[in-house]
């Protein structure tokens, strides 16, 4: 009887987790240009096909103003923010850098945090895999 239980014991152990995918170097560049109105929010959509690096850069802000931007996941209600950054006047560019851990549909929000004096134009560059 003891031998029978010993034979069943290995079958009840936890399975070995599969290895995590290795992030790939980003090679896809998407550029979005926009005009942000007072107290406005603009959403730019993009899709990621594989696990890998992500860099989002906001630049060419005219007139030079404080802008906020965020990376998010597309959802039924819009863009669910995962991480955000505020860019102060005087800086040439601002970047969010990270790793996308699963393929999917993502979004970048650019929004006024009650700081722009008039509509602002900008360039948003998304580098992903």
Image: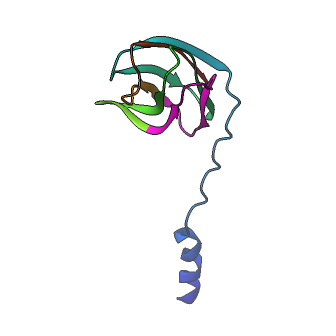
Vertical placement of 72 versus 90: above or below? below
Residue in view at x 60 percent, y 30 percent: 95
Task: Indicate the colouring scheme.
Answer: rainbow
Residue in view at x 62 percent, y 24 percent: 93
Q: Main secondary structure of the magenta part?
A: strand
Pinpoint residue 84: horizontal percent, then vertical percent.
48, 37
User: In this image, 80 relative to 9: left or right?
Assistant: left
User: In this image, 27 relative to 49: left or right?
Assistant: right
User: In this image, 75 relative to 14: left or right?
Assistant: left
Nearer the observer, 38 or 69:
38
Magenta extent: 82-104
Query: How many numbered dots are placed on residues in this image?
Result: 0
Pinpoint residue 74: horizontal percent, then vertical percent.
39, 29
Residue in view at x 56 percent, y 76 percent: 9
Q: Quick one: which residue is furthest to the bottom in this view?
A: 2
Nearer the observer, 113 or 126:
113
Q: Is residue 85 magenta?
A: yes
Quadrant including the C terminus? top right
Pinpoint residue 50: horizontal percent, then vertical percent.
59, 30
Residue 59, picture quadrant: top right
Vertical placement of 8 versus 105: above or below? below
Q: Is residue 19 magenta?
A: no
Nearer the observer, 116 or 94:
116
Pinpoint residue 62: horizontal percent, then vertical percent.
52, 12
Residue in view at x 53 percent, y 30 percent: 87
Q: Quick one: which residue is furthest to the left in this view?
A: 77
Nearer the observer, 102 or 72:
72
Residue 94, picture quadrant: top right
């Amino acid at each position: 009887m003891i031998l029978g239980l010993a034979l069943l014991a290995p079958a009840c152990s936890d399975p070995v987790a599969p290895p995590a995918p290795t992030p790939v170097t980003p090679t896809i560049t998407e550029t979005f240009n926009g005009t942000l109105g007072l107290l406005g929010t603009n959403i730019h959509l993009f899709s990621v096909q594989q696990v890998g690096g992500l860099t989002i850069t906001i630049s060419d802000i005219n007139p030079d103003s404080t802008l906020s931007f965020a990376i998010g996941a597309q959802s039924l209600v819009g863009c669910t923010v995962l991480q955000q950054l505020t860019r102060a006047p005087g800086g040439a560019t601002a970047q969010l850098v990270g790793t996308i851990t699963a393929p999917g549909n993502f979004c970048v929000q650019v929004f006024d945090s009650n700081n722009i004096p008039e509509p602002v134009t900008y360039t948003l560059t998304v580098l992903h895999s």
